Image (cartoon, helix red, strand yellow):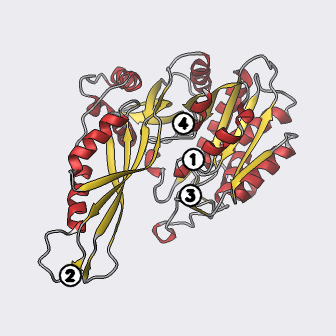
Amino acid sequence: MPTDETALPEVVEIARDLIRIDTTNHGGGRSQGEREAAEYVGAYLEALGLDAQYYEPIPRRTNVMARVPGRDRDKPALVLHGHLDVVPAIAEDWSVDPFGGVIRDGMLWGRGAVDMKDMDAMILTSVADILRSGEQPERDLVLTFFADEENGGVEGSALVVQDHPEWFAGATEAISEVGGYSVAVGDRTAYLLQVGEKALLWIRLVARGRAAHGSSVHADNAVTKLAAAVAALGRTEWPVRMTATTQAMVDGLAALTGGDTADPDALAASAGAASGFLRSSLRTTTNPTGLTAGYKHNVIPDRAEALIDVRVLPGTEEAALADIRRIVGDDVEIELVHGDIGLEVPFEGDLVDAMVAALGRHDPGVPVIPYLLGGGTDNKALAALSIAGYGFAPLRLPADLDFTGMFHGVDERVPLDALVFGQRVLTDLLRSY
């Protein structure tokens, strides 16, 4: 694989260019905005002869879409979607400029390299390969690139689905991020196909007390109350609860390793670097992610707040909130900042068969295992239109690369040859399905 930037495959060039457009999203309406990235994508689509449509419901929060006519217009359309925003990157923590799009050690480095400007580039160049060859995909493709996914899509996909459902007319299925990548399972390899997502509950804990001088003997301290609740919730060991998807995942891992399906955690651990992703799919998770309290060293504040990222199995939202109320106690209020649904779709059907077959043609003999994503994607918004969403951003990865650790991590990077592999698999799928 060439590392000279003058000889890069187009899929790498596009991913690099997108990384170099800073689309940092801090959440809560604080964002660099996706406008320049959306305009870049729109210009690329228009150069292919497509009609790029834009929707900017909030200044600089830009979404872009184009429809590619298929050979068989009677077949339901397929949505291929990506998001253009990225989470923040603290530059001094990185070994490269996180927005430099650096090519080093056979990899493309930068914020968005795996989440998810790599897949954005794969979508664009796969469609380009088909159209430039004078062909059409098998069915209509709806190419959509959303804003604000890293904030739950509240200023992106949720508004697009609400205000422009006609973009997705005739579509019944969707493909997006966080699936289709290879993982090492013991001394074997498997691909993980994402067929579900946990539900999202972003909550705020609020503790109240009485303001006082910092030198006081003071029992009514909001910070102390909050700290106890945060520690209790953050240290809770949530039990394993199986769903149809996670049971299929456990069965697949057991078939590869000979492990015991009665111990799902041990089987998930067999996936090495990916084990954290897989273990999180087996249970509720409650991770504290932010603290706010006080304004001066010698003033005891009357209010303290904490942000908790809660992810629960589909359909267990109310039960999880009841457990959280019990854990944090009556002295702490719980506010729901943002919530979104969980999803599970069957690991069967024509699209699943086509994705598995496409991987098999390019990496023969490697099994494909379904899994439930611990995080979330814009498939949640599309579910409101009865569109079944899958995670399929195919990447063949080195066994020693902690790929799942790259999501929102430091020194995010993706191998160049994995990008080329993924673009070929995706092109193959779009030609045949």
Q: What residue type is labelled 1?
A: Gly
Q: Which amino acid does label 4 sit on?
A: Lys
Q: Earlier in the sequence, mark 2 or mark 4?
A: 2
Q: Mark 1 points at which residue?
A: 153
Q: Which of marks 4 and 1 is nearer the N terminus?
A: 1
Callout 3 secondary element: loop
Q: Earlier in the sequence, mark 4 or mark 3?
A: 3
**Nearer to us in this view, 109 or 334:** 334
Residue 253, image x, y percentages? 36, 26
Q: Distance between the residues labelled 2 and 4?
A: 46 Å
Instruction: Indicate left or right for 360 with 78 as reference.
Output: left
Q: Residue at x 49, y 66 (%)?
A: 94
Instruction: Indicate left or right for 154 with 295 as reference.
Output: right
Q: How many marks can you see? A: 4
Q: How far apart are marks 1 and 3 (CA)?
A: 19 Å
Residue 250, image x, y percentages? 35, 25
Q: Mark 2 points at which residue?
A: 214
Instruction: Indicate left or right for 273 with 121 as reference.
Output: left
Q: Which amino acid does label 2 sit on?
A: Gly
Q: Name the residue under label 3.
A: 111
